[in-house]
Structures are given as C-alpha cells and as structure tokens.
Image: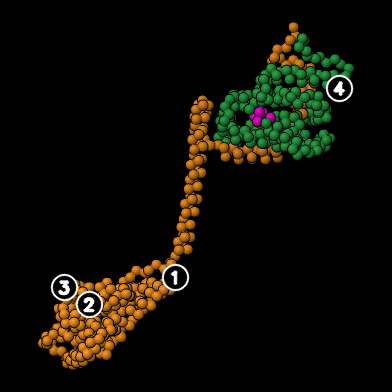
Amino acid sequence: VFGDGFASVLRAARRGDETAWTRLYLDLAPTLTGYLRGRGCPTPEDVTSETLLQVVRDLCRFDGDELAFRSWVFTIAHHRLIDAARKVSARPSTPLPHERLEESSPPLSSFEEQVIAELGVAELEPLLRACTPDQRDVLLLRYVADLSLQQVAEVLGKEYNAVKAVHRRALNALRTHLADTVYPGRVVRTLTPSG
Amino acid sequence: MNTPTPDRDEAAEGPVHDLLWRLRARLVTPPTEQRVDADLDRLLSAARDHAHIAPADADVEFTRPAAIIAEDLPPVAHLRGYRVLDRVGKVAAVFVLVVGVGGAVVMRPGMDGSTGIPAILGQGDGNENGLFVANADEVADGQAGLDIDDVGSTPSSENEGVSDASQSNEAPASQETPIGTSSGRSTDVGPTTGSTGGSGSTDAGAGSTPAPKPSPSEASPKPSPSPTTEPSEDSDGFDGFGGGRLCPAPSDTEDDSAEGEDEKANDGKKDSENGEVSEPNPNPCVPPKPEDGEGEDSSIEEEEESSANEEAASQLRKPKLPGDPPERGPRG
C-alpha cells in the first residue's frame, strides 16, 4: 500500500521509471499470484506477468487513486484468468498432486513462512472446494486482494448487492465446512439474515 | 436485532477469520528472485517502449484533468503515423531509384546495336564513327545502306568530272587538295542535289573514303565550254577537285549558272530563271546517259576537254613569278 505517495509513483511509472515499476511489481505480484493460485490457475506466475505487462501498456489510459488502481489491476487479472481457463479447457493437462507441489516448493526461511507452510495446501484445498466458483472469487478478492465489496463488484462486473449476497453465502459455507471437518464437536455460529 | 449491515464483516471473525487469514498467508507468497528479475526485465523494457511523454512535460501533463490528457494523446498517434509514412516514402524512393537505374542499364544504347542512338554529327573522327553506327543499322535493316555506299564511294569521282568540266583548268591543282576540306561544305550540297543518298550519305562518301583522282577518260560528257560563274572564294585554286564540292552549291546564283551551263551544253538554250530542266537528273552525282544525237557532241567535248586539261597542265608546269597576275580561271 502506497498511501499518499501513490500519485508520484504512478507518474514515475508512466515515465518508465525503473524504481516505480519495481515498487509496483513487489506490491502487486504476490497478491495477484495468490488470487490466481487460489482460483486454481495452473500457471499463476505466468498470468501475473502477463497481467502486469498489460498494466504497463494500458497505464496511460488509467486515471484514479490507489484503490481504483488495484481494482483495475485485478480486473485485468480476472480477464487473464478467464483466458487461461479457456486455454486449459482447449488443451487439458493433468495437474500435479499437492504432495509433489510441496516437495518442489522453494525453501522457506522465515519463521512465519515455516508456520504457514505447516498449514499445508491440502488443508485449504477442501476449504475452497466447499465454495462455488463465484463464492471463491468473492472470498479471494475480498481477503487475498484486500478489495472492498464494491471493488469486488467492479472487478467481477456484477451488482454490489449480488456480490454482497454471494459473499454472505460463501462465509456460511466456510462455517459449515469448519463445523463438519475442523471442529466437529463445536458449534460454529452461522450468520443468518434474522440473526 | 443482529441484522448485519452491508459493510459489517463480523461473519469473518472467529474461526472463519482465522481460516481466511491462513488461506491468505498460504496463497500470497513473494515470488522468487529469479522470477522477480525475469518479470522486471520484461516490465521495464515494455515501460520504456510505452513511455511516450517527455519527463519535463510529464509533471505538467498529469496534473491536468484526464479529459485534457485524453485529448493530448491523439497527436502522439499522429506522430506515429507520420513516422510510418516517412518510412514508407523512403522505401518508395529507394524502389523508384533502383527501378530507374535498372531500366537505364537495360535500355543503354549500343548493347546489341538494335537500340543504337545516332551519334552527334560533325565532330571530327566521331562523325565517321557516328555515321558508321547509324549506317550499320540501316544496312542491317534493308537496302538503304547499299545506296548509301554506292553514292558515297563511286559516284563521287563522276561528279568530280562534272565539276572539273566546269573548272577544267583547276582540275590538276585540286588533286592536291586535302579531301577533308570538302567535308565541311558537303552538307550544303546534299539538299540542292536531291540525290537519293541524301546529304549525309554524300558526306560519308567524301569524308570517309578518299575519292579517286579524276582522269580525263572519266570526264563528264557534258562539259561546259566556258565557266560563267563568277570567281568566288571557292575558286581559289582548291576548287579544282569539284570545287571542294561533289555537287553544285546551294546558292541560287550557282544553281542558276550551273543549270544554265548545262542547258547551254545540252540544248544551247538558257533557262536560268525558272531553273527547269527538261529531264532532271534524279541523281546529279551520276552522269546522265548520252542520248541520241548527243554522242557526237560528247566526243567533241571530250576532245576539247582533253586539250583544255593539257593547257592547264602546261600552265601548272610553268613556274609562277611574283609579278604574274593571279589565275582567274579559263576565261578567254
């Protein structure tokens, strides 16, 4: 998050400044990759790179603040994700199992990363699988990309109320999943319209 | 009333919030250094290509409203178009230049003789070469070249006989006249003669091949008994060899006088005003055949001519003294 310095960074990026683009890349690339990986993109890093290249090409057409910029970038990433899904459907491939992905993952250094790694992808995979694709999109954009529901609606091209309803259903699905798998003996509070 | 407001996100609290946090922490991982280097190289190269606005103008440009910035973008597209047109124009110019040079090389004269361009006439040796080239083309084309050669070589001696007859006393002196002196005037002769070979061909005959010396036996059968032409600059002793001309001069006086002499010799009737001849010779360089009734006259004329030549030869043998009057021709 750049805050007040975002305008100067954006001007420098339009001039082709190397430092500005490095900062933008380091800020956007991890969240973009996480969103794409959570959506099941087979090559999230490649799609992230294509998304940022599109940002470079179309930056002269953008006008707005930082939140609008992030929403615009994830909109491009969402479109790229759809294109990648179409390519995968046209040429299907066999994905690697998560065990092999964990073996091939890069070495982790920090303590936080080690703790996160202990959680395992296998634990989160059923969590996301419990949601529908629309609910997964909303959850990832809301909690991984740190976008507001209004921005999520803009990215997905839907109405705000529709996105809010999808978000609510996604959370209920997660609670149900947790109650059934992670905390089988506990009652997880569910959110109902009546309270 | 626990009805959640739209902005409330209390449902993500507790175990669900923890789960989402873990999900985020697992998915959002920093890229590797190799990936960062590769992606930044691509991004920076693309950013340099798309950085159209100068750094000095960038601060001014982006402080203005977006609408004004959008209006400023089309000129950049126009500049691109102009650059493309400039390149296309350069390529077209190079193409036209190459095609022009190639066409010039293909159409260069003298490659096979068929496309030869006539050389510039009247330039010394180049005259002969140019005529040779032009005549060679004509020879290759048809009969015209044969006529040219005939007129250029053999009839010249006969015409010399005609002119010698009119200036018989100067004939021996003209034998020493350089042949080249006649080439400068021969162009004036052609049009008046109306010969089939034309002036150019006559020039070729006189200029390229030296005419044989006139002999008394080859003299014209119609000599003029007394030259009536007034002495001119041509009659300075070098005009004996046909007066430096193979055919009569184009001047009216000379034409009239020559024709009148011919009339005198043939019919004894002078018709110099209209210049008409009963039977015009199509080629004055070729002597007309003697008609009936003229054979005796021709024999008499030959005798007179031979005697006149002998007298001229005797006069030439006599050494000239400084006090002697200049020769003015065979008058009286």
Q: Nearer the viewer, mark 1 or mark 4?
A: 1
Disc 1, disc 3: CB below 8 Å? Answer: no
The residue type indicated by label 3 comes to Glu
Please determine whether, in this image, residue B94 is positioned above or below residue A115: below
> How many neighbours does mark 4 have within 10 angstroms: few (below 14), some (14-19), or many (20 or more)?
few
Chain holding disc 1: B
First of labels 3, 2 by sequence position: 3
The reply to whether the magenta stretch includes residue B12 is no
Color used for chain B? orange
Please determine whether, in this image, residue B48 is positioned above or below residue A139: below
**Label drawn at residue B278:** 2
Magenta-drawn segment: A73-78
Q: Position of residue B115 (x, y in %)?
A: 43, 67
Color used for chain A? green
Residue B134 in view in this figure: yes
Q: Position of residue B30 (x, y in %)?
A: 72, 32
Residue marked by disc 4: A181
**Label drawn at residue B113:** 1
Q: Nearer the viewer, mark 4 or mark 2?
A: 2
Circles 1 and 4 on the same chain: no
Measure the alpha-carbon separation of dots 1 and 4.
103 Å
Circles 3 and 2 on the same chain: yes
Helix, strand or loop: magenta stretch: helix
Measure the alpha-carbon separation of dots 3 and 2.
14 Å
Pick whichever, A10 or A45, lies toward us. A45
Pick whichever, B181 or A32, lies toward us. B181
Circles 2 and 1 on the same chain: yes
Looking at the image, residue B41 sits to the left or right of residue A86; the answer is left
Residue marked by disc 3: B273
Residue B179 in view in this figure: no
